[in-house]
Amino acid sequence: MPEHTVWRFARADLQRTPSVESGWTVAQEELDRAKACGLIYSAGRRLQVPQNTAAAACMFLQRFFMRHTLQEFHHYDVAATCLFVACKAEESVRRLEAFVPVIAHCASKGRRRAAAGSVEYAKWRAVILRTEVAVLQALCFDVVVDQPHARLAEVAAAEGLCRRAAQLAWGFVGDCLRLPLAVVFPARVVACAAIVVAARVAGGEPRDGWLERAGVARADVAEAVQWLLEFYVREAHARMGGGVGGSTGSEQGGAGSEQGGTPAEHGATVGELPAAA
């Protein structure tokens, strides 16, 4: 069965994930998943893995939590394991001796060290190797993903997107993957949503009719854009102490958005897509 069919869920399915059914709110689960992807990005940068490896890890994590609960698996344990699996799947393998210390550092915000032979190293090594089995089983050993960054590059090239907007869109795709967007929408929709947000920040949206030429539904892109921008607002509120009822999982520290400023900070707002030409 095609990948896009096997791993596509309705957004309503997020209202009844295993975590929600075990007591998490939808907002709490979304935030914990985003924090987990923040760890993936932070560790990925330190390990100098390619962008496609970190993106694949985030997609693995989003798929995993459609079948397992945050009560059973801590989001950082799964994040570390998904990155480890993605390194293998995307042919950017990192040895555990190099991988584990970086994960321990990023997960603890630099407070813990995990040199080979230490208790902390042994703990993380055991967690990753144990969780790897659960991750692969949850993924049905399907580690091939359609990369939204690749679709973004295709659309940007085809439509002559300006350099500034393309660069911003690249970062916004990364933020899209912190949310379950890639298990609800095809990769091309995620890419186009990132382009729309980038265009609101930088200007330079592609020529009229570009969504139709990209082969995506305008309603899907509009929903994805709104989802991302509303998440930025909720995340900013949580950072300021308002929270979303608090994160259910215990916190070991996390990485923020890799984007370097949210669209709201650049003046973008939640709104509708311009009418089709």
Image (cartoon, rainbow, N blue to C red):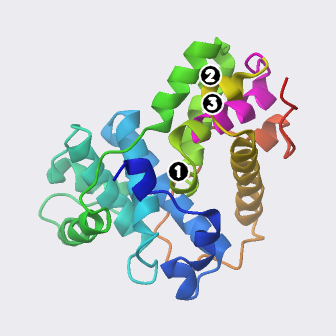
Q: Which mark is residue 182?
A: 1
What's under tag 2, amino acid-wise? Answer: Ala
Instruction: Decide whether residue 194 is among the magenta residues.
Output: yes
Q: Residue at x 75, y 69 (%)?
A: 241
What's under tag 1, amino acid-wise? Answer: Ala
Q: CA distance from mark 2 to mark 3?
A: 5 Å
Bounds of the magenta span? 190-207
Residue highlighted by disc 2: 166
Instruction: Decide whether residue 183 is among the magenta residues.
Output: no
Residue highlighted by disc 3: 169
Indicate which disc, 3 or 1, sits on the residue closer to the N terminus: 3
Q: Secondary structure at mark 2?
A: helix
Label 2, residues with CA under 10 Å away: few <14, some 14-19, many ≥20? many
Residue 192 placed where, x, y %?
64, 33
Q: Nearer the viewer, mark 3 or mark 1?
A: 1
Q: CA distance from mark 1 to mark 2?
A: 19 Å
Q: Nearer the viewer, residue 65 or 124?
A: 65
